Amino acid sequence: MLCGASAVLAVGGAVAVSGCSSSASPAASDSGSTKSTDQSTKSAGQPAGPVAVGPAADVPVGGGTVYREKKIVVTQPTAGQYKAFSAVCTHAGCVVDKVANGQIQCPCHSSRFAVADGAVQDGPAPSPLPEYKVTVQGGSLEVTPA
């Protein structure tokens, strides 16, 4: 048997494919689950602060903006009042994907959080989004994890 490469054997019109693997390197499989993605997001931790996220003008009054790559969501509940939260859902570690209808929304299991304080408005999330400190410097938002 060949190791490190695939072996192909044709016998009587049938084709057999053989390969070998050690127990130290498990075969790859695709379970169709997003759990591994969720876990890597959860284990990535919070950003080291302070983090420049973008222009304050990008955050609508009564809504917010998700900075997915930074795992931060910034909201503006009322004009000039900015709030920042972790964008990692407290239920399964998915990153929230949008802010709509006054709520920060998680796409994985439909948890919803308030733009004003990150409180859970609709589960299954067990706790609010962690709040971060946000400041406006020269029209740009800067976020520091708490």
Image: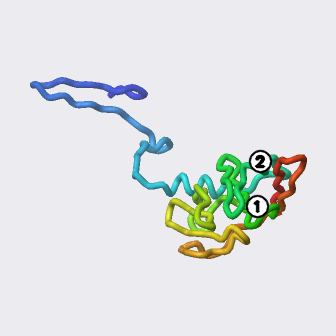
In the picture shown, does residue 120 fall above or below 144? below
Identify which residue is drawn at 69% across, 64% down. 62
Out of 74 and 57, give the one closest to the viewer: 57
Residue named by callout 1:
84
In the picture shown, does residue 116 fall above or below 30? below
Residue named by callout 2:
53
In the picture shown, does residue 114 fall above or below 39? below
Question: What amino acid is labelled 1 in the image?
Answer: Ala
User: x and y percent of residue 105 in the render?
Assistant: 58, 63
- Is disc 2 surrounded by few (<14), some (14 to 19) or many (20+) residues within 10 Å? some
**Quick check: marks 2 and 1 in contact, CB under 8 Å?**
yes
User: x and y percent of residue 72 in the render?
Assistant: 71, 55
Residue 11, picture quadrant: top left
Identify which residue is drawn at 48% across, 41% down. 25
What kind of element bears circle 2?
Answer: strand
Q: Quadrant of the N terminus?
A: top left
